[in-house]
Amino acid sequence: MFKKLFGFMTTMERCSSEGTTLANAKINKEYIIKEVRTNDEELKNFLFTLGCYEGEIVTILSILAENYVISIKDARYSIDKDLAETIITN
């Protein structure tokens, strides 16, 4: 009731409404990219050249020492945790 009166959302509700970052995603599960959340245009353009943009399907293949091997459009890339945190998925 308190939550409803004052408009508070639990962490789980906030994650489901805003999406989650690729850094928190599960291995071997397909996700749809909702957005790339960064103010760095160069970083956004780099991810775009990899095929990482809104509506595209991405899968984490493995995680080793904060490096994420991801699959986008039948290609595999290795990105670091900072990049993975900018990619918002469903």
Image (tube, rainbow, N blue to C red):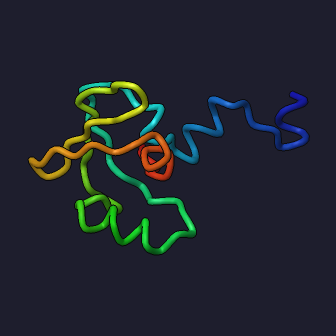
Looking at the figure, which quarter contains the C terminus?
top left
The relative height of residue 84 versus residue 28 in the rendered view (above or below) is: below
Q: In which quarter of the image is residue 27?
A: top left
Observer-nearest of 14 and 79: 79
Residue 61: image location, x then y, percent: 23, 30
Judged left or right of residue 37, residue 2 is right
Q: For the point 35% across and 61% down, which residue is it?
A: 54
For the point 22% across and 46% down, the residue is: 77
Residue 9 x, y percent position in the rendering: 75, 37
User: Who's the residue at 36% across and 52% down the image?
Assistant: 33
Q: Nearer the viewer, residue 69 or 9?
A: 69
Q: Give whichever of 56, 69 is nearer the camera.
A: 69
Residue 21 pos. (x, y %): 48, 42
User: Could you say where residue 62 lies in the image, as x and y percent from the top left?
Assistant: 27, 27
Q: Which residue is drawn at 12% across and 48% down?
A: 75
Quadrant housing residue 26: top left
Q: In which quarter of the image is the N terminus?
A: top right
Figure disc tally: 0
Image: 32 above or below 51 = above
> As drawn, is 76 to the left or to the right of 90?
left
Q: Residue pushed farthest left?
A: 74
